[in-house]
Image (spheres, grey):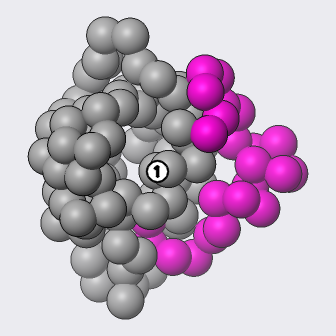
Amino acid sequence: MAAGEPVSLDAAVEWLRKHFDPEAARGLDVAFQYALTGPGGGRLYARVDDGRLEVALGDVESPDARFHLRASDFFAILAGRENADLLFTAGRIEVEGDLSIALKMRKLFRPQR
């Protein structure tokens, strides 16, 4: 694992805050819910409101998209070791809700370098 790679829910929340691109989020009003299974799993959400981000542990009311995946896969996506599109195609990520909104998630967070 690379330095700074998230390995817990708290670290993932901090990673999302640090890598958020407010310019890419201008004009968006969306909420994403993550249900992560396995070791290190739990629930967290990200709410975007016109360039502002709220991200925290727990649940958000009326999310536009819900993601269900293993915590280890989520952490690997954030670290740039896994490709979310490939994991989705392989059935390792389930998405509920508006898929077009779910796809916006990719543009809102700059990948780890």
x, y (%) of residue 61? 31, 10
Q: Residue furthest top?
A: 61
Front residue of this view, candidates 23 and 31: 23
**Quarter holding residue 28:** top left
Judge whether 51 appears above or below 43 on screen: below
Side of 69 relative to 109 (left or right): right
Q: Which residues are magenta?
A: 78-100
x, y (%) of residue 99? 65, 35
Q: Secondary structure at mark 1?
A: helix
Query: Is residue 47 highlighted in magenta?
Result: no
Q: Quadrant of the C terminus?
A: bottom left
Side of 14 relative to 34 (left or right): left
Judge whether 26 appears above or below 64 on screen: below
The residue depicted at 41 percent of the width and 19 percent of the height is 63
Counting the numbered discs, the total is: 1
x, y (%) of residue 73? 59, 55
Q: Residue furthest right?
A: 90
Query: Is residue 88 highlighted in magenta?
Result: yes
The residue singled out by tag 1 in the image is 105
The kind of residue on which mark 1 rests is Met
**Quarter holding residue 54:** top left
Q: Residue furthest front?
A: 27
Q: Is residue 10 among the parts visible in the rendering?
A: no
